[in-house]
Image (cartoon, helix red, strand yellow):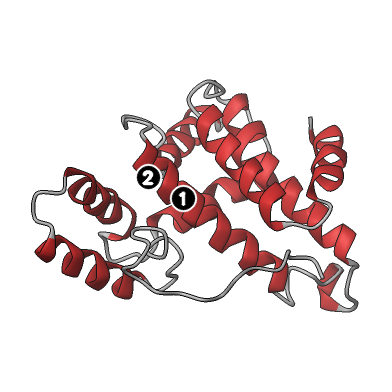
Amino acid sequence: MLLKEEDKKIDLFQDWPKHYYEMEDSEERQRCLLSYLEQHPYSKEDHRRHEIYKKRFGNKNGDGFMRAWMMLKMKENEGRSFLLRKRQQREVFSCLRDLCILDETCDELLIAEWQSFAHQLIRSYASSPVYRSAVFGMASVGEKNTAKRIAHEIIEVTEVIPSSYGYTEETACFQQVFKESYLQLITNGEQYWQEAQEECI
């Protein structure tokens, strides 16, 4: 099994805010958070949590983190062009800003939101038939190759692409969150991460 076994028992408010971050439905997360804020109106942490929620989900395009991630992923296939450098620089800047990497305080609550996003993304990739298929979907790949694909994408999006546009320092915390999440979720993750990093860098 690619993903490590996890305890699925959930008692939402007993261990707040742990299970808030495990929710994948954004509307349910907001309802839950607003309900908690009604009971704890002076909680600075939860007002900050709501602020981050609005930055991630507060537009008509759905999950802003996911949209920014996919746009950065496209840069891997687009390649580096001297003629397009300025446009690409603006696009990368915009993506990093939408991920709250730029012009944001990297506090514990933002890190928790990044962890939630990382876990959702990695689980989605690990269970996706599309992501586990070979070229043109004609055959499936093994768990090792799937795990390395996921690691490759994380390294490209969080490290290689930002660094190529001068954002190495700014993305260090974000990159670390994704690496730790990968190692936590993926069986034999240490080995696959090391192999992928040697191939990417």
Are the residues flagged by discs 1 and 2 in contact, CB closer than 8 Å?
A: yes
Q: Which secondary structure, mark 1? A: helix
Which residue bears the numbered disc 1? 68
Residue drawn at point x = 48 percent, y = 28 percent: 86
Q: Which secondary structure, mark 2? A: helix
Quarter containing the N terminus: bottom right
Taking the image as shown, residue 72 lies to the left or right of residue 67, namely right
Disc number for residue 165: none
Residue 122 at x, y percent in the picture: 64, 59
Residue drawn at point x = 41 percent, y = 35 percent: 101
- Above or below — where is 123 with respect to 88? below
Of residues 83 and 51, which is closer to you in this image?
51
Of residues 10 and 55, which is closer to you in this image?
10
Q: Amino acid at mark 1?
A: Ala
Question: Counting residues from the N terminus, which is met first, the one under dot 1 or under dot 2?
Answer: 1
- How many residues crowd around disc 1 within 10 Å: few (fewer than 14), some, or many (20 or more)? some
Residue 150 at x, y percent in the picture: 73, 54
Which residue bears the numbered disc 2? 98
- How many residues crowd around disc 2 within 10 Å: few (fewer than 14), some, or many (20 or more)? some
Residue 87 at x, y percent in the picture: 47, 34
Residue drawn at point x = 43 percent, y = 41 percent: 111
Taking the image as shown, residue 117 lies to the left or right of residue 76, namely left
Residue 184 at x, y percent in the picture: 67, 51
- Above or below — where is 171 with respect to 111? above
Q: Amino acid at mark 2?
A: Asp
